[in-house]
Amino acid sequence: MDQETLFSADRSQAPLAEQKRPNSFDGLVGQDHILNDRFRRILESDRWAGLVFWGPPGTGKTSLAKIIAGFTKRKFHLLSGVTCGVKEIKEVLDSSKQDFRLGKLAHILFIDEIHRLNKAQQDVLLPFLEEGSVRFIGATTENPSFELNNALASRSLIFQFKSLSKEDVLKLLDRAAPPSYQFAESVLERVADLSNGDARRALTLLDHLCLTRPLGEQISLEDLEKVCDSQSLYYDKHGEAHHDTISAFIKSVRGSDPDAAVYYLARMLESGEDPLFIARRLIILASEDIGNANPAALMIATSAFQAVHAIGMPEGRIILSQATTYLACSEKSNRSYVAINKAQDTVKRSGNLEIPVCIRNAAAHYRYPHDEESGRVKQEYLPKELRGKRFYEPSIHGQEKRFVDFLKARPRD
């Protein structure tokens, strides 16, 4: 799809979210931290190779990509990582390269849900980005650090989009509300609450709501509730259900309550929460809250993430349930987490203290522990200013309790 088709096509029969898609920077709301002077200068210089927009659904990623196409006057091609393959990508790349060699502007290739492409598919873009024969924009709801090839990420500027505030959503609804309908007090505010910061959800809900009543009639809160019964179960009126539920989930696992944990897991999955988001939180919890009390917990959580990523839903729920109940029933220790916090605080306050000579690279007086029958030597490893300092103090829970006796028996100067 090129920019002429993009901005001149009749969108009157399209869903409301598409009809009201902004076609200028001023029309885009909610991403002021991105749409600043620095971003404008990047576009005006027209020397960027790739942009990656990372953030929740309905926050303006696709809209901004289309606006950039109009601003830079480049041909625009939109592909989806869900449906496209190497063949479709190559067709766009070759078309852009042909124009580029004729002295024309390189095209913009926008790939929505770029995280759905495998590494080999992503690699197809690299030589074209290197020579500047295409401009790439990718959109993803997943952390690019996990889902993008390092080579592709290193050639792209990454911008994180935020969920829209309630005020931003209300601004969009006020613009989009058809003048031929009347809305009872608080209806649009309730729609904004239910959208959970997703502009597309808000406009789709408004669109469906208008279809329920004849032109000219007033739309009430009762009409809204009939349309969105299923949504109101999952999102509270302050848009905080996502944060509250993941918090309750983590605290239930930390508190060793598998029943509560799997209940909140079910609520998140039923609400459409990203299963990989849940899996990533379990990996963090396995290290932060279980740690060396049960080192296998981290392996279980990491394996769960990989398995869910490989097979997807709905079967992924079984894997998440297994990992959740295992972690909830595991011995707990946060001592590794506490240790790194203490160590980082010390480094910030004391700076880079001098490393003992005996453990520097190619040190002459280093004593090799494996040469001793006990596997231990009397040797100081911390800088002299920190001698005797304890960052890691193992708990008496699970496997970690063995570390207490081990460290007590360690010889010291």
Image (cartoon, rainbow, N blue to C red):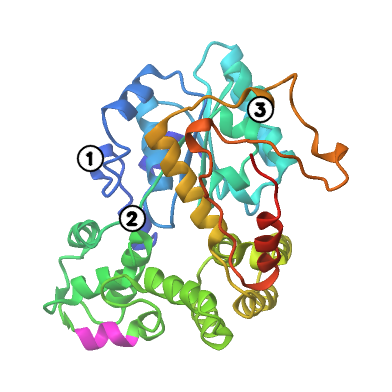
Q: Residue at x 39, y 57 (%)?
A: 58
On screen, residue 129 above or below 305: above
For the residue pair 80 and 244, the one nearer the viewer reads as: 244
Specify whether residue 225 is painted magenta: yes
Q: Amino acid at mark 1?
A: Asp
In the image, is residue 294 above or below residue 90?
Answer: below
Q: Are marks 2 and 1 in contact (CB under 8 Å)?
A: no
Q: Nearer the viewer, residue 62 or 120?
A: 120
Q: Are marks 1 and 3 in contact (CB under 8 Å)?
A: no
**Local crowd at mark 3 within 10 Å, few (<14), some, or many (≥20)?**
some
Position of 201 with respect to 86 (left or right) is left
Q: What segment carries the magenta color?
A: 221-226
Q: Residue 291 placed where, x, y %? A: 62, 62
Question: What crowding class fits label 2: few (fewer than 14 Cα within 10 Å), some (14-19), or many (20 or more)?
Answer: some
Pointer 3 residue: 126
Mark in front: 2 vs 3: 3
Circle 3 SS class: helix
Please give the residue where the numbered disc 2 appears in the rendered image. 19
Residue receiving disc 1: 26
Q: Looking at the image, which residue is at 36% across and 51% down?
A: 162
